[in-house]
Image (tube, rainbow, N blue to C red):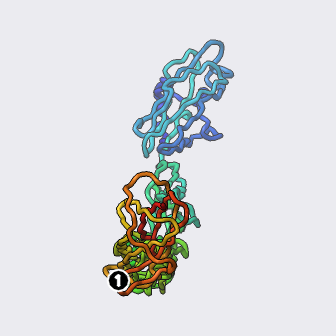
Amino acid sequence: MRTRWRALALLLAGLGLAAGATAAVADEISNNLDGTVDPVAEQMALNVGGPAGTTKLYVLPKNGDGKNGCNLAASSTLTVSVSSDNPSVATVSPSSLTFTSCGDQLTVTVTPVAIGSANVGVAQTGNTTGGTFDLTNATFAVSVAPPPNTAPSIVISGVTGGVSYPKGSVPTATCEVTDAEDGNSSFLATLGAITGPYAADGIGQRTASCSYTDVGGLTASASLTYGIHDPTPPVVTYMLTPPAPDGANGWYASDVTVQWSVSEPESPNSLTKTGCVDQSITADQTPQTYSCSATSAGGGPVGNSVTIRRDATAPTGVAFVGGPVDGGLYFPNTVPGPGTCTADDATSTLAGCVVTGHSTALGGHTLTATATDVAGNTATATLTYLVRKLDLYGFYQPVDMGGVVNTVKNGSTVPLKFRVGDQGVQQTSTAIVKSFTQQKVGCTGGSEDSIEELASAGGTSLRYDTTGAQFIQNWKTPTGAGTCYRVTLTTVDDSSLSALFKLK
């Protein structure tokens, strides 16, 4: 509050009154900080950083200085200066005001600078009214207090309470502060420990907390709880050795191992497995399925399976069906067909059996029966046989061979003498002869030779002559001189001897 001696000093300075003079009759200049005009100094309360304060200065006529009514009449003016005695606490503007009528209300603006107090004084710097003015009540005191303090507010951004986020993708929890005095700010929230049965895996519930105390000592806080979950179920895979079937048609023909792998990096402590037993298959088996199933906090069950069929055993009991017999002797025209074969297979079953090596060519031959099971295992069996031809010797005398045309009287009988050998063994059975044929042919070319010896009539059947150790077939020649014939002996192997005859 201002003091009376200061008010008096300002008044004396403003009006230029002599010592002992009184200002009781002068018009007054006052402010509107309150609704009264009194000797109590008015106070303007401001805050550092707050809005500027204003007051209006106006004229109160007193009719006591020899002039009735307001001193400001016609074109007269009163000019005063306005100043702060402590500009480091508060400043004032404008620094000069001019009144031109008693109705003027001129604004004074005071701007707070720092905590403290100051006095705003008014002094007369010009007066053309001829009257006097009391400026005592125009002065006032200014009190600048600390800034006003409103409570801050705080919210948590980034995460939302009650929402569950995938592990590894949880947003950053941030404290967002709003404070009218301190200004807005943000900082990372304080994160509590993860709770729940799988907290060790970073899965469960977590609380984000924020607290802020402003310069004025007011505190705001907030917290929320969100979830963290495993976003993916386990992954179940297996490794096979060999990596793919080494037999046919999806069968393994060797030992097989199955090794399971279950991956759950997000929540390993929540993992449960069913099956998932590594296998070593060393015995033949029909198709068998092995499985692995897993469940975790990330979901499930998820599983995988593999079917293994193993047959490493070749077919058994390979046997020929039909065809040549083992050690058989055959003429080219009597060799049986290749025949077929059979076999047994206990696991993958028989896929087929094939006979190879069949031939009717002269010489020894080997037949091979190859049995194959569905897994591709094979087994074989073999037999051998011989294909040979008979050795024919003859015709002997009286018949000439080598392209000679034998001349003989028509109607006579010619003895056809010959021997038959089978691998060096002379044959004696007439069954070795298949046929005798005669064929009329042209009588051109070739030397001729008369048959010196003729058999007696009759006895044309084939016989083996033990005395001569030869076969004899008496051929009764046809009638008809001048005709020619080819007589052919054919044995059971389709070997043959032929002789030419001309009838005379």
Q: Badge 1 is on which residue?
A: 468
Query: Horizontal placement of 215 versus 402: left or right?
Result: right
Spot the residue most to the top.
75
- Around disc 1, counting alpha carbons within 10 Å, would you say few (fewer than 14), some (14 to 19), or many (20 or more)? few
- The image position of residue 172, as x and y in percent, is 46, 58
Q: Is residue 35 visible?
A: yes
- The image position of residue 110, as x and y in percent, is 51, 35
* Quarter residue 299 falls in: bottom right
Could you tell me the amino acid type at mark 1?
Gly
Residue situated in front as seen by the camera: 426 or 166: 426
Q: Is residue 281 visible?
A: no
Spot the residue most to the right.
69
Task: Say if 256 sits above or below 8 in the image.
Answer: below
Residue at left offset 62%, top offset 36%: 32
* Quarter residue 133 falls in: top right
Residue at left offset 64%, top offset 24%: 104
- The image position of residue 471, as x and y in percent, is 41, 80
Task: Say if 50 sits above or below 482 in the image.
Answer: above
Task: Say if 288 sits above or below 156 in the image.
Answer: below
Residue situated in front as seen by the camera: 400 or 281: 400
Residue situated in front as seen by the camera: 35 or 501: 501
Residue situated in front as seen by the camera: 449 or 113: 449
Helix, strand or loop under label 1: loop
Residue at left offset 44%, top offset 87%: 317
Q: Please give the count of numbered marks on the rendered protein.
A: 1
Task: Say if 159 sits above or below 33 in the image.
Answer: below
- The image position of residue 437, as x and y in percent, is 51, 69
Residue at left offset 62%, top offset 41%: 34
